[in-house]
Image: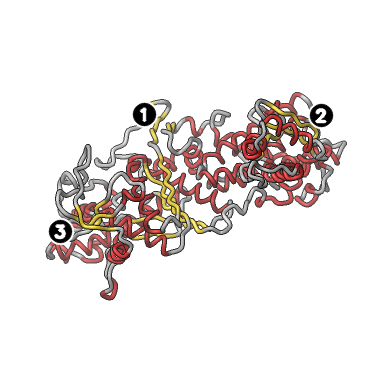
């Protein structure tokens, strides 16, 4: 039950009942008519923009149209009060029975309350993390991992067919560096004194197990080979070992991808056939999307793939990019960008309607070219959406925690999860919009206080479960099953705090829809904190006013109604936490 969608339909019906025609004689377009929560609850329970968005079409003043609509809406049995505010906003108050129906729906539908058909099975690819397989996940990857995973969760809950994907950058020069670093550890495993790791190689101890594995599998044989012979062998082992490490690191955060796509596969010629990059270039040529030409020198830092000579260029500027982009260098080798184009084409051919990329803030300059690729390859049929994640700054009790990936002395994702737990990491990475910087304090995220959002929300769920257990203990034989609670006399609930809680839960389907539409999972985290705050506030009122307590041994009918309220809050909190990949504990000590 989505009360906002339901009342939007009622408002549209009221417009149609007035039988108004536009200045062109046609019926008005009602697609922009919405029902929202008023910014100030004192104005009402619901508000509609109908008069504001329809007035111009109908050639009337918004206020005059609002008055006509208000009169029609007053006839609705579920509406107790209608008022017109400002230039033409219409505010509604609804009967308590409406909230009681919402509460019944929450308990009956359980985890499905809030699900929507917005996605209608649309195929969506969410690519996130995609860190170079040159070391363990560090804390800089954590935010993108959580945002991407939670976004996939929101979209799946909203009815999309979602695939979670990791793009393995296993074809660049960094993989040669990785292999050379692993080869040193191989020699070390054979007993050699390798001394200090040379500058430019990866110095971390995480490569020692790979060296040991190579030594066990090959003995000293690799040492006798030329570099051209041992390099591909070590590359294969090193990338596989790093990806095993990365998967394990991500698993500690409860992040699991459906697809791991190898960049190297785009360059491969299977059974003598053209590579996927070759196929991409041929397809672009047929569409006249590439040409031979030169590019002016870019402003600022000159990228590696820029050449002051004729190259094969993609007509990116025709599709909204700042400049055309090189696909093939003058020496015939492909640019990094060529692999990106081929990768997008592969996704498109796999049937995705929407491709979402969750990238670090340092990839901001890449957004336009990705979107240009999407428009060109799909002919505008598939949408490219990019979400950038700003940096995370680590603190411990207010003091900065430093990290340095190059030196091998850095804070890993696993370090963070093992110190504070998976749930605080996931929730706090989402308790700020992805494109805003985030300060993460190890001490604060483990505090048991209202100032720690993850504790406050999880405590809300545990508190609900505690009430249900207490009711079973104090009222022997009480049937507090979901079926019994959904059938309780919910009209017993008339306190302002009770109705406020139901009103907050009524917003859940709309929150899910909005988070899916805007690709902003932080909206879920904000909402859960808001709902938990209302629960705790109502709980505290019960301490001062015993008549508001959830369990009343002398009034079973009232107790069942209030237990339905408690159960509903726990269900919505659990659904939201599940979307975010956070546990909903039944007890907290």
* Location of mark 2 (residue): 547
Residues 553 and 324: in front is 324
Residue drawn at 28 percent across, 38 percent down? 404
What residue sits right under mark 1 in the picture?
400
Q: Callout 2: 10 Å neighbours few (<14), some, many (20+)?
A: few
Type of colouring = secondary structure
Disc 1 from disc 2: Cα separation: 49 Å
Closest to the camera, between mark 3 and mark 2, is: 3
Above or below, 148 relative to 162 = above
The count of marks equals 3
Label 1, label 3: how many angstroms apart (C-alpha)? 47 Å
> Can you name the residue that lies furthest to the front here?
24
Q: Is residue 470 visible?
A: yes
Residue 352 lies, with reference to residue 549, above or below; the image says below
Residue 504: x and y in percent read: 67, 37
- Residue bearing mark 3: 331
Q: Secondary structure at mark 1?
A: strand
Most foreground residue, 500 or 574: 500
Q: Earlier in the sequence, mark 1 or mark 2?
A: 1
- Mark 1 surroundings: few (<14), some (14-19) or many (≥20) residues within 10 A: few
Whether residue 484 sits left or right of residue 283 in the image: it is right
- Per the model, the C-alpha gap separating discs 3 and 2 is 83 Å
Label whose residue precedes the other's in the sequence (3 or 2): 3
How far across and how far down the image is residue 44, in percent? 72, 30
């Amino acid at each position: 039950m989505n009360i906002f969608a339901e009342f939007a339909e009622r408002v549209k019906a009221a417009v149609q009942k007035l039988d108004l025609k536009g200045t062109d004689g046609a019926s008005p377009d009602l697609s922009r008519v919405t029902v929202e929560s008023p910014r100030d609850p004192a104005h009402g329970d619901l508000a509609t923009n109908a008069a504001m968005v329809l007035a111009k079409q109908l050639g009337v003043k918004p206020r005059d149209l609002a008055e006509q609509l208000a009169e029609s809406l007053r006839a609705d049995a579920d509406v107790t009060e209608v008022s017109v505010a400002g230039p033409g906003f219409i505010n509604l108050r609804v009967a308590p029975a409406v909230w009681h129906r919402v509460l019944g729906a929450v308990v009956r539908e359980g985890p499905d309350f809030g699900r929507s058909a917005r996605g209608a099975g649309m195929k969506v690819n969410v690519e996130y993390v995609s860190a170079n397989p040159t070391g363990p996940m560090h804390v800089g990857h954590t935010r993108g991992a959580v945002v991407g995973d939670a976004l996939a969760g929101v979209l799946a809950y909203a009815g999309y067919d979602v695939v979670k994907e990791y793009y393995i950058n296993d074809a660049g020069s960094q993989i040669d560096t990785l292999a050379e670093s692993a080869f040193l550890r191989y020699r070390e495993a054979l007993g050699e004194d390798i001394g200090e790791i040379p500058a430019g190689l990866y110095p971390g101890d995480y490569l020692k197990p790979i060296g040991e594995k190579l030594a066990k599998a090959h003995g000293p044989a690799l040492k006798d080979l030329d570099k051209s012979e041992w390099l591909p062998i070590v590359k294969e082992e090193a990338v596989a070992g790093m990806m095993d490490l990365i998967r394990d690191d991500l698993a500690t955060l409860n992040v699991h991808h459906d697809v791991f796509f190898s960049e190297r596969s785009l360059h491969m010629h299977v059974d003598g056939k053209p590579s996927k990059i070759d196929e991409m270039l041929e397809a672009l040529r047929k569409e006249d999307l590439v040409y031979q030409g030169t590019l002016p020198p870019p402003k600022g830092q000159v990228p590696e793939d820029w050449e002051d000579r004729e190259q094969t260029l993609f007509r990116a500027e025709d599709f909204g990019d700042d400049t055309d982009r090189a696909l093939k260098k003058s020496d015939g080798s492909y640019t990094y960008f060529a692999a990106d184009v081929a990768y997008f084409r592969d996704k498109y051919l796999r049937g995705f309607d929407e491709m979402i990329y969750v990238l670090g803030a340092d990839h901001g300059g890449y957004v336009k070219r990705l979107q240009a690729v999407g428009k060109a390859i799909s002919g505008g049929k598939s949408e490219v959406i990019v979400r950038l994640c700003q940096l995370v700054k680590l603190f411990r009790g207010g003091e900065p925690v430093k990290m340095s990936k190059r030196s091998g002395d850095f804070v890993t994702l696993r370090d963070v999860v093992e110190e504070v737990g998976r749930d605080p990491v996931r929730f706090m990475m989402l308790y700020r919009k992805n494109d805003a910087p985030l300060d993460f304090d190890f001490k604060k995220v483990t505090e048991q206080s209202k100032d720690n959002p993850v504790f406050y929300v999880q405590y809300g769920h545990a508190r609900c479960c505690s009430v249900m257990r207490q009711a079973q203990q104090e009222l022997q034989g009480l049937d507090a099953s979901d079926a019994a609670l959904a059938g309780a006399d919910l009209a017993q609930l008339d306190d302002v705090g009770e109705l406020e809680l139901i009103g907050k839960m009524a917003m859940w389907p709309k929150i899910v829809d909005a988070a899916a539409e805007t690709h902003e999972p932080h909206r879920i985290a904000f909402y859960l904190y808001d709902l938990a705050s209302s629960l705790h506030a109502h709980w505290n009122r019960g301490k001062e006013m015993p008549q508001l307590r959830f369990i009343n041994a002398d009034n079973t009918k009232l107790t069942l109604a209030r237990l339905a309220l408690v159960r509903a809050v726990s269900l919505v909190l659990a659904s939201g936490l599940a979307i975010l990949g956070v546990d909903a504990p039944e007890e907290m000590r």
